[in-house]
Image (cartoon, rainbow, N blue to C red):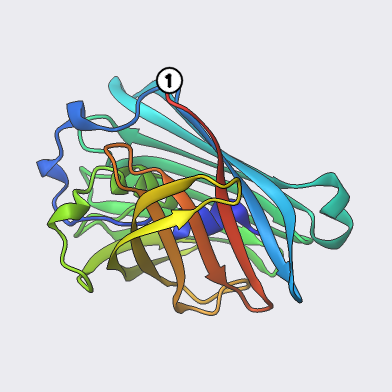
Amino acid sequence: MRLPILVIAILSLIPPNLSAQNKSQYPFRSGERVTYTAYYNWKFIWLSAGLAEFNVKDTVLNNEPAFHFISTGHSHSSYDWFFKVRDRFESVARKANLSPLCFLRDTYEGGYKAFNRYSFSYPDSVLTIDSYTSSRPFNQKKFKLDRPIFDVLTAIYYCRTIDFNKLRKGERLPLSMAVDDGVYDLYIRYLGNEKIQHRDGRTFDTFKFSVMLVEGTIFKGGEDMFVWVSADERKLPILVESKILIGSVKAYLLDYKPY
């Protein structure tokens, strides 16, 4: 149901060496828009619960060319009575290597409000997190930037630069990510190639992997989330599936507009 978090969390496939990325090889550019439909499992029925959209724009921050990533998510109006969702995530990242510069999360999910603002200061090697939730008052925390640390949006777009063909089945890739008001050392596990069928009948050749999640208000934690991305240069997520505290959810690719 928390579709942006669902899609974002499972796509966090980050190799440790940022400097190795050639920005001309990015499989996305300004103007790209990708939309997903979320489905919630109720007993034996999969119900269409909401939509999430991901957009890429150009911007400049501190005189440095950057990407502006934006993700919004909402439940269908007919579903709001049960679990209303209105989510917005924004991140600004350097074009040179996709390292995040700032991040904003403003979400409302079933009566639960959450706000995060991250500031990445590389000259000082400090990540500052300002946050509050419905159950926690405003607080500020600082973390040392002694390794690459990503927010959830920059993680998504950086993972699309990975060459899955160079990974061994079962291989784990570590990543460090800021989630809510903390920093966590997580990982993904590559599970090999798989041909899957979309709900609309189309078939896709994909790369499949599982993701180590942070336990929270929706997810149980552990490797109970799986993602299938297209086995081509775009590496678009086609299907995401995860167990949650009550039931399970899926997210299917609905629409893709390159630029």
Q: Nearer the viewer, residue 68 or 25?
A: 25
Q: Quadrant of residue 234?
A: top left
Query: Callout 1: helix, strand or loop?
Result: loop
Q: Residues within 10 Å of mark 1 (few under 14, many from 20)?
A: few
Of residue 227 and residue 114, the one placed in the foreground of this image is 227
Q: Amino acid at mark 1?
A: Tyr
Location of residue 223 by image quarter: bottom left
Image quadrant where one finds the N terminus = bottom right
Above-or-below relation of 110 to 127: below
Q: Position of residue 19 (x, y in %)?
A: 12, 42
Q: Looking at the picture, does residue 250 appear above or below residue 35?
A: below
Residue 24 screen position, x and y as percent? 19, 26
The residue to which callout 1 is attached is: 259
Q: Using residue 185 as the reference point, say whether residue 24 is left or right of it.
A: left
Which residue occupies the foreground of this view, 88 or 75? 75
Q: Is residue 20 visible?
A: yes
Q: Answer above or below: position of 60 versus 165.
A: above
Left or right: where 16 falls relative to 183: left
Q: Is residue 251 left or right of residue 170?
A: right
Residue 137 location (% of width, % of height) = 65, 64
Q: Is residue 142 visible?
A: no
- Residue drawn where x is 23% and y is 54% of the image: 148
Q: Position of residue 173 (x, y in %)?
A: 22, 66
Instruction: Specify the quadrant of the image occupied by residue 112.
Output: bottom right
Q: Quadrant of the C terminus?
A: top left
Q: Nearer the viewer, residue 204 or 66?
A: 204
